[in-house]
């Protein structure tokens, strides 16, 4: 397999950190082992790579005489075998280049170097002699913040120039800080809760598994507020007590200060945190501390799965049903599934915690592959909210309004009792479509086949697919008509406007990624809600998770039908999960019970009936039966291919060429090519092919062979998505 020490130099296989490039062989002038991080020459440049088992990845044939030599070994912890296996699995399963997957496992090259000190900038407290609005803003925002110039500028919402001006004025200074900060160890015995019987039973099962080690997947299912977090914290405690590290994955939006505060209250120290917004210094520190074992618990977004743990003894995936665990750009992997694989390679238990398990997970429980732990009731005797549907055919809202009379009445009662309301609508902005009443023009995105969404608070029209932004035009861009543009349909801003007209004295807060994007603003908003400073929250799914607001007793789902439109494979299942989660915000204490009102034009749809009657089991059984019948996931498998080009005929020709040799037979069928529902995105024309396979068929092998056999123009891109979640 591999000779570690070498004289004369041996050949080593290296995966360069270069997406789109496979493994390459080099000469090793120094002793090297798989997992070592190295610098290798590639063309005129030096790049980072990782030494790999030669029998685990194929490489291009290069004759001995033409091999170049590894430049040096980087003084950083090697990529350990379980993580290498995960990287290999992700590359194989999702048909991705190993280099692209490897990039997710290594921080930026500079962070690999063992710099003892790094330079950061921070406020000195010195007030500059003269000031401007931008300087004032930066000054106010930056107390206690440190980072690079660009990071400070971003945190304060000012330009780099403003920060440089403040440095020149002495208000911000450059300091050198230790690259490796200390991570206080969480104490498993710090403040354990007294668990209720069902909680204690589930916690014991998980803690035993964490102590014993060995790969064991669990589904921890319990309604919102049943204490799933408390329960898996006991498993974290057991992993810590056994000398291990633990990883808790959360959807990015749930990674908020309240969760971290709760962790700290239980364990007496904060966990290490990992998400896409970390500053480069924090990224380097955390990565090194995880590799060195000083960081004992990491709470992170899905990317934390690729951290270099050295003694991982537990993985938890909280809100495991969340579709956002699926990465949609770059390497399209599913964080939940990759978490289970990492646990398998680390030989440790993995816990999927959720109130609304995905059908994929339920099927694995039924097949006996996952152990099932259930928390049947809310903690402390709190009752579940009462769910009722409002039939919009009987109670249509007035024209141009979105709240029906029964919902308006319920809001009034709730406000009258001094309690809080959440109006849930999973759509950002003011209106999803702007239409000219004179000429019929609908304002679309120039680069995508979609309409621009009006964001009135920003005075802009925005494409939610590519981010294209224009100021809201004063007149119709087509016919020039003034005052003829009309907003069609509701977004949260519009519902907030309606609520403000109905209840002028109520304090209304909008909660979307536009208004409370970024952890700091989210925390401020959530504490304002907790403190009772807001009466009505109008929010998207950003509001649907994790926060406890004891005074919030009414959840109005403004458009319960929204998720059913478009009709992809998981539309009904997702609607169920989303509405159940949003409803879970209502009345989470024993003293006050909550209610959930669903505005719908389809009160008889199976999802609505399941939500109203609390018959999740029957609904999922029916969904599962339909999927089984159609050979759809989790009973069959899918791979989606999107063929795109900036030139429409070329995109179509490429899609048709692929269609001709598409895999068929042996339990595999290919549907399409057909224009993708989003037929243009970012200026590229898109066609789709969908490969459906029996579980027993070799889906990846068939797709790999297929793509290898078709030569396409270099401008054509083929995106492959195994187990797709988005069908646009
Ligand atoms: P879930 O994760 O299932 O939504 P949580 O773990 O967040 O539930 O628990 C809901 C609320 O009940 C939280 O405020 C939590 O602190 C509290 N809670 C749950 N179990 C206990 C317990 N055994 N002792 C004290 N508080 C508890
Ligand atoms: Zn666009």
Image (cartoon, rainbow, N blue to C red):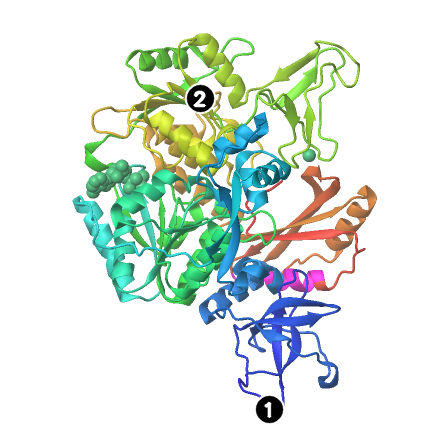
Residue 7 is tagged as 1
Q: Which residues are magenta?
A: 696-707
Looking at the rendering, the quadrant in which ligand 2 lies is top right
Tell me residue 599's x, y (percent). 44, 20
Which sits in the foreground, 134 or 79? 134
Q: Is residue 697 magenta?
A: yes
Tell me residue 424's x, y (percent). 44, 25
Q: CA distance from mark 2 to mark 1?
A: 69 Å
Residue name at image x 69 percent, y 72 percent:
41
Name of the residue lying farthest toward the bottom: 7
Residue 424 visible here: no
Mark toward the viewer: 2 or 1 = 1
Of the 4 image quadrants, the one containing the N terminus is bottom right
Q: Residues within 10 Å of mark 1 (few under 14, many from 20)?
A: few
Residue name at image x 48 percent, y 45 percent:
146
Mark 2 lies on residue: 509
């Amino acid at each position: 397999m591999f000779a570690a020490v070498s004289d004369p130099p041996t050949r080593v296989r290296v995966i360069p950190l270069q997406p789109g490039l496979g493994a390459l062989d080099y000469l090793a002038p120094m002793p090297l082992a798989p997992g070592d991080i190295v610098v290798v020459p590639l063309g005129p440049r030096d790049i980072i790579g990782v030494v790999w088992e030669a029998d685990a990845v194929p490489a291009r044939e290069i004759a001995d005489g033409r091999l170049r030599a590894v430049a040096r070994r980087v003084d950083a912890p090697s990529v350990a075998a379980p993580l290498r296996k995960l990287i290999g699995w992700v590359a194989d399963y999702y048909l991705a280049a190993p280099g692209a997957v490897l990039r997710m496992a290594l921080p930026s090259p500079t962070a690999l170097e063992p710099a003892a000190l790094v330079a950061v900038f921070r406020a000195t407290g010195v007030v500059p002699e003269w000031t401007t609005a931008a300087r004032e803003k930066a000054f106010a925002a930056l107390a206690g913040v440190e980072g690079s110039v660009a990071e400070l500028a971003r945190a304060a919402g000012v330009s780099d120039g403003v920060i440089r001006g403040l440095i020149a004025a002495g208000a911000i200074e450059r300091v050198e800080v230790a690259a490796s900060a200390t991570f206080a160890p969480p104490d498993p015995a710090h403040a354990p809760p007294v668990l209720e019987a069902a909680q204690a039973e589930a916690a014991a099962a998980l803690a035993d598994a964490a102590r014993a080690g060995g790969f064991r997947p669990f589904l921890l299912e319990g309604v919102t507020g049943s204490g799933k977090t408390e329960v898996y914290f006991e498993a974290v405690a057991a992993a810590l007590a056994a000398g291990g590290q633990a990883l808790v994955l959360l959807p990015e939006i749930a990674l908020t200060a309240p969760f971290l505060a709760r962790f700290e209250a239980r364990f007496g120290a904060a966990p290490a945190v990992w998400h896409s917004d970390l500053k480069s210094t924090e990224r380097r520190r955390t990565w090194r501390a995880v590799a060195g074992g000083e960081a004992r618990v990491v709470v992170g977004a899905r990317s934390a799965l690729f951290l270099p743990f050295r003694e991982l003894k537990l993985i938890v995936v909280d809100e495991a049903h969340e579709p956002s665990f699926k990465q949609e750009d770059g390497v399209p992997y599913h964080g939940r599934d990759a978490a289970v694989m990492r646990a398998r390679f680390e030989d440790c238990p993995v816990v999927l915690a959720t109130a609304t398990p995905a059908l994929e997970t339920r099927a694995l429980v039924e097949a006996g592959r996952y152990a099932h732990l259930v928390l049947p009731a809310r903690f402390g005797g709190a009752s579940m909210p009462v769910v009722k549907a409002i039939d919009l055919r009987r109670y249509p809202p007035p024209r141009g309004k979105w709240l029906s009379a029964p919902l308006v009445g319920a809001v009034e009662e709730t406000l009258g009792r001094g309690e809080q309301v959440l109006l849930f609508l999973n759509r950002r902005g003011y209106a999803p479509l702007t239409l000219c009443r004179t000429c019929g023009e609908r304002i679309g995105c120039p680069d995508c086949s979609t309409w621009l969404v009006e964001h009135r608070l920003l005075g802009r029209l925005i494409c939610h697919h590519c981010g294209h932004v224009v100021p809201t035009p004063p007149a119709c861009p087509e016919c020039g008509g003034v005052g003829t543009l009309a907003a069609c349909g509701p977004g949260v801003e519009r519902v907030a406007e309606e609520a403000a007209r109905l209840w002028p004295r109520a304090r209304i807060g909008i909660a979307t990624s536009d208004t409370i994007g970024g952890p700091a603003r989210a925390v401020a908003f959530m504490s304002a809600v907790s403190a009772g400073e807001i009466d009505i929250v109008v929010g998207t799914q950003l509001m649907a998770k994790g926060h406890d607001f004891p005074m919030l007793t009414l959840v109005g789902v403004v458009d319960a039908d929204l998720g059913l439109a478009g009709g992809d494979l998981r539309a009904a299942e997702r609607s169920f999960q989303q509405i159940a989660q949003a409803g879970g915000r209502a009345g989470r204490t024993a003293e006050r019970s909550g209610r959930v009102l669903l505005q719908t034009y389809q009160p008889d749809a199976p999802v609505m009936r399941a939500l109203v009657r609390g018959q999740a089991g029957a609904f999922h059984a029916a969904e599962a039966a339909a999927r089984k019948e159609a050979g759809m996931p989790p009973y069959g498998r899918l791979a989606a291919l999107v063929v795109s080009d900036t030139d429409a005929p070329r995109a179509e020709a490429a899609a048709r060429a692929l269609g001709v040799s598409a895999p068929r037979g042996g339990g595999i069928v290919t549907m399409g090519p057909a224009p993708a529902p989003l037929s243009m995105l970012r200026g590229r024309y898109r066609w789709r092919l969908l490969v459906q396979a029996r579980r027993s068929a070799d889906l990846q092998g068939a797709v790999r062979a297929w793509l290898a056999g078709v030569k396409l123009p270099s401008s054509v891109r083929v995106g492959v998505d195994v187990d797709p979640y988005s069908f646009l």
